[in-house]
Image (cartoon, grey):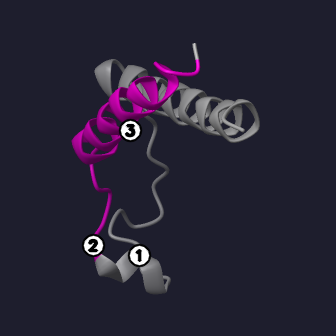
């Protein structure tokens, strides 16, 4: 298990990068400084976008778990 853990981390990290890059950017730099391009309307994720978001969160959690396992078991 210890020998394949780094490979699992690499695959998870690549999938996490793809998941983050596929998500829609809501607004540009303006929203980072308090601007709102949607005029106060709340944006809800639906369909594939919601599934992609949930999958990205799951991949992030799995990556964190494997990183901690590698940290503690890799001694």
- Asked whether, in this view, residue 13 is left or right of residue 71, the answer is left
Q: Camera-side residue: 44 or 60?
A: 60
* Residue depicted at 31% across the width and 80% down the height: 29
Disc 1 + disc 3, Cβ < 8 Å: no
In which quadrant of the rendered view does residue 55 lie?
A: top left
| Dot 2 crowding, Cα within 10 Å, few <14, some 14–19, many 20+ | few
**Which numbered circle lies on residue 63?**
none
Which residue is under mark 1?
31
Q: Which residue is mark 3?
A: 13
First in sequence: mark 3 vs mark 2: 3
Q: Which residues, given as a range, are shown in magenta?
A: 2-28
Specify which label sits upstream in the sequence, 1 or 3: 3
Quadrant of the snapshot with the C terminus = top right
Name which residue lies at 43% across and 23% down. 8
Residue 32 placement (x, y as % from top left)? 44, 79
Q: Are marks 1 and 2 in contact (CB under 8 Å)?
A: yes
Classify 10 Å Cα crowding around label 1: few (below 14), some (14-19), many (20 and above).
few
Q: CA distance from mark 1 to mark 3?
A: 27 Å
Prevailing secondary structure of the magenta residues: helix
Which residue is depicted at the point 40% across and 20% down? 51
Q: Which mark is residue 28?
A: 2
Looking at the image, residue 5 sits to the left or right of residue 20; the answer is right
């Amino acid at each position: 298990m210890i020998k394949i853990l780094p490979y699992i981390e690499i695959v998870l990290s690549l999938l996490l990068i793809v998941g983050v890059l596929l998500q829609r950017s809501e607004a540009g730099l303006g929203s980072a400084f308090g601007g709102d391009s949607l005029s106060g309307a709340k944006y809800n994720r639906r369909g594939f976008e919601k599934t992609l978001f949930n999958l990205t969160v799951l991949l992030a959690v799995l990556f964190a778990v494997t990183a901690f396992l590698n940290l503690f078991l890799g001694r």
